[in-house]
């Protein structure tokens, strides 16, 4: 949350309220975990690299060359990985 101080939880409260903390982080909040009043960790939301909408989400964006799944290509890949 830009411009707002992150809320702090001590370790015991964080363990007790982990599910609630995760829900808040999923909503965009940042939570600081402290030990004896000293911040030791921050729980922040992760941003997805790719937002897939479902199967076929690359349809029309990905071009496969002819023979991409041929036995020869598969054998070449297997040789590259010593399989």
Image (spheres, rainbow, N blue to C red):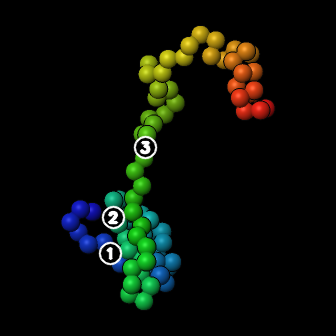
Mark whose residue sits in front, 3 or 1: 3
Quarter of the rendering containing residue 52: top left
Q: Residues within 10 Å of mark 1 (few under 14, many from 20)?
A: few
Label 2 secondary element: loop
The image's mark for residue 29 is 2
Relative placement, left or right, of 83 versus 67 is right
Closer to us: 83 or 71: 83
Residue linked to disc 3? 49
The Cα atoms of the two marked residues, 2 and 1, are separated by: 8 Å
**Residue 59 makes an appearance in the image:** no
Kindly indicate whether the residue at mark 1 contacts the one at mark 3 (C-beta within 8 angstroms). no
Q: Residues within 10 Å of mark 3 (few under 14, many from 20)?
A: few
Q: Residue at x 77, y 32 (%)?
A: 82
The residue labelled by disc 1 is 7
Q: Is residue 71 in view?
A: yes
58 relative position to 8: left or right: right
Q: Which residue occupies 40% across, 51% down?
A: 47
């Amino acid at each position: 949350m830009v411009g707002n101080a992150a809320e702090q939880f001590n370790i015991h409260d964080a363990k007790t309220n982990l599910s609630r903390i995760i829900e808040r982080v999923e909503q965009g909040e940042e939570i600081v975990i402290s030990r004896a009043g000293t911040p030791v960790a921050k729980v922040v939301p992760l941003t997805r690299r790719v937002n897939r909408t479902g199967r076929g989400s690359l349809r029309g964006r990905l071009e496969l060359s002819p023979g991409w799944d041929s036995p020869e290509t598969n054998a070449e890949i297997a040789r590259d990985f010593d399989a």
